[in-house]
């Protein structure tokens, strides 16, 4: 409880995660590139302190969490890329533990870890799953790569934000498991969209599909939490299509590194559907939740 924590990135997920740390009695300084985002409110309302600079956030921190967007964002904020601009590592005290919860792929996680370690710091890659609901409720799943002793040190912090914390192996292994997770999630969404279309054509109540199929072998988080959203056209973003496309880009990259002959036809189809929706509404479709994939079927039935 005496650990000082910095949390970098107070977006839809990060704001709720940082708020849960505060609610559990931890001292947290938060930083976000954009200061007026509504997603910061849960953190400050819980008693978290928002600071203006990376230096203020991390200079006294024992543990630095980050929850950011794509590979360049994480690299810039943690390491620093722009001329004259320092990353968080430049302000951290020796032996500070950095924990990145973003999805950035194995190669980037290892590269960032090597840089931090060379500067006397420590690192865990800890991408998570569970969506905005899991972030708010503190029920996220964390897939952690790195030293077991480092994970044990901050286990109470993970437990404030999640209900399932799994040590996956060395640095980068958390990212590897997360990419497997995103592969499953994307293919689930294909099946969910096609199932709800079929139910509609057969005049079956979609809630019945969720209740009955969800209690059997076809049950999944996606069916339980997103099934009715697909059926009713609720496209509010718990996890935006633009973020899923980023994750699937990483899936493609690592699959090519592993084996150029590795076949992922279902992922190729999922990417096609998500890209189709991302282009709708003058590009604003990318901001909608992944359940909006159904729009690729409903809005363009002749071009599937």
Image (cartoon, rainbow, N blue to C red):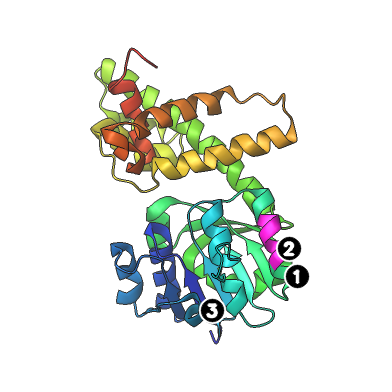
Cα separation between marks 3 and 2: 19 Å
Q: Residue 58 got which mark? A: 3
Residue extending furthest front?
Answer: 83
Residue 93, quarter of picture: bottom right
On the image, which quarter does residue 251 sit in? Answer: top right
Cβ–Cβ below 8 Å for labels 3 and 1?
no
Q: Count of labels shown?
A: 3
What is the CA distance from the residue labelled 1 to the residue labelled 2? 6 Å
What residue appears at the point 58 percent right and 76 percent down from the top-left corner? 63
Q: Position of residue 87 (x, y in %)?
A: 57, 69
Picture residue at 45% right of the left edge, 45% below the top: 243
In the image, 180: left or right of 169?
left
Q: Residue furthest top?
A: 302
Q: Is residue 299 left or right of residue 142?
A: left
Residue nearer the viewer, 183 or 84? 84
Query: Mark 1 — residue?
Result: 118
Asked whether the residues under the numbered discs 1 and 2 touch, taking CB atoms below 8 Å apart as contact, a structural biologist would say yes
- Magenta run includes residue 124: no
Q: Which residues are magenta?
A: 109-115
């Amino acid at each position: 409880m005496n650990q000082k924590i910095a949390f970098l990135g107070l977006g839809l997920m990060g704001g709720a995660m940082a708020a849960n740390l505060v609610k559990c009695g931890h001292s947290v300084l938060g930083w976000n590139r954009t200061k007026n985002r509504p997603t910061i409110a849960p953190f400050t309302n819980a008693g978290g302190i928002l600071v203006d600079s990376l230096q203020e956030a991390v200079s006294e921190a024992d543990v630095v969490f980050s929850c950011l967007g794509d590979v360049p964002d994480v690299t810039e904020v943690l390491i620093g890329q722009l001329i004259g601009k320092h990353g968080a590592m430049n302000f951290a005290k020796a032996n500070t533990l950095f924990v990145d919860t973003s999805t950035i792929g194995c190669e980037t996680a290892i590269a960032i870890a090597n840089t931090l370690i060379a500067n006397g710091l420590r690192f865990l890659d800890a991408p998570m799953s569970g969506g905005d609901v899991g972030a708010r409720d503190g029920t996220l799943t964390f897939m952690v790569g790195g030293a077991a002793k480092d994970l044990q040190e901050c286990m109470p912090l993970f437990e404030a934000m999640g209900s399932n914390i799994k040590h996956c192996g060395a640095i980068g292994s958390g990212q590897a498991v997360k990419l497997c997770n995103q592969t499953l999630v994307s293919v689930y969404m294909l099946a969910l969209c096609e199932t709800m279309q079929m139910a509609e054509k057969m005049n079956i109540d979609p809630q019945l599909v969720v209740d009955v199929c969800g209690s059997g072998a076809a049950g999944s988080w996606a069916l339980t939490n997103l099934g009715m959203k697909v059926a009713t056209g609720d496209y509010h973003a718990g996890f935006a299509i633009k973020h899923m496309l980023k994750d699937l880009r990483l899936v493609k990259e690592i699959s090519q590194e592993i084996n150029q002959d590795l076949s992922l036809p279902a992922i190729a189809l999922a990417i096609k559907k998500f890209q189709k929706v991302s282009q709708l509404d003058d590009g604003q479709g990318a901001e909608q939740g992944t359940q909006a994939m159904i729009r690729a079927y409903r809005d363009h039935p002749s071009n599937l």
